[in-house]
Amino acid sequence: MDIKTGNNEFYVEDQQGNKAAQITFFEEKDDEIVIDHTEVAEDLRGQSIGYQLVEHVVEKARAENKKIIPQCPYAEKQLKENDEFHDILA
């Protein structure tokens, strides 16, 4: 799956070029990223795309030495349930 970078978002396009999956975030203070929304089109669910989108934000946060505040329920669940993400939680 080709995950693209947008303005405060990572996303996947469908064959028509529309956003079919998306995670949005914004920067809070100088050292925090807030994930505020994750959405995956129904026909793409069950393919770990949402998880991959969360991973992209985690990689960004680690590269920038920032912590993540998950306001989105899906992102919060992924970050708290997966031990490899615990270091990045604010």
Image (tube, helix red, strand yellow):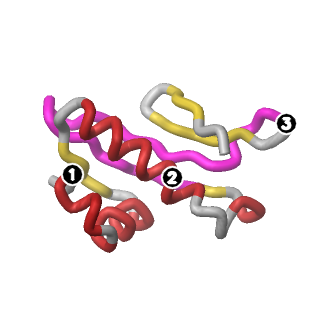
Q: Secondary structure at mark 2?
A: helix
Residue 79 falls left or right of residue 48: left
Task: Residue 23: say if magenta.
Answer: yes
What's under tag 1, amino acid-wise? Ile
**Residue at the spot of label 3:** 16
* Marks 1, 3: nearer the viewer: 1
| Residue 29 numbered mark, or none | none
Q: Residue furthest bottom?
A: 81
Residue 32 falls left or right of residue 26: left
Q: Are the residues flagged by discs 1 and 3 in contact, CB closer than 8 Å? A: no
Residue in front for this viewpoint, 60 or 22: 60
Marks 1 and 3, Cα distance to the nearest angstrom?
35 Å
What's under tag 2, amino acid-wise? Gln
What's under tag 3, amino acid-wise? Gln
Query: In percent of the image, x 17 and y 35: which residue is there?
Result: 65
Q: Percent position (x, y) of residue 14?
A: 78, 43
Q: Which one is earlier in the sequence, the residue at label 3 or at label 2?
A: 3
**Residue at the spot of label 1:** 88
**Residue at the spot of label 2:** 52
Query: In percent of the image, x 21 and y 37: which residue is there?
Result: 28
Residue numbers of the magenta segment: 16-39
Q: Percent position (x, y) of residue 35?
A: 36, 49
**Residue 16 to residue 50: above or below:** above
Residue in front for this viewpoint, 30 or 48: 48
Query: In percent of the image, x 14 and y 35: which residue is there?
Result: 31
Q: Percent position (x, y) of residue 33?
A: 26, 41
**Residue 80 to residue 13: above or below:** below
Q: Residue furthest front?
A: 84
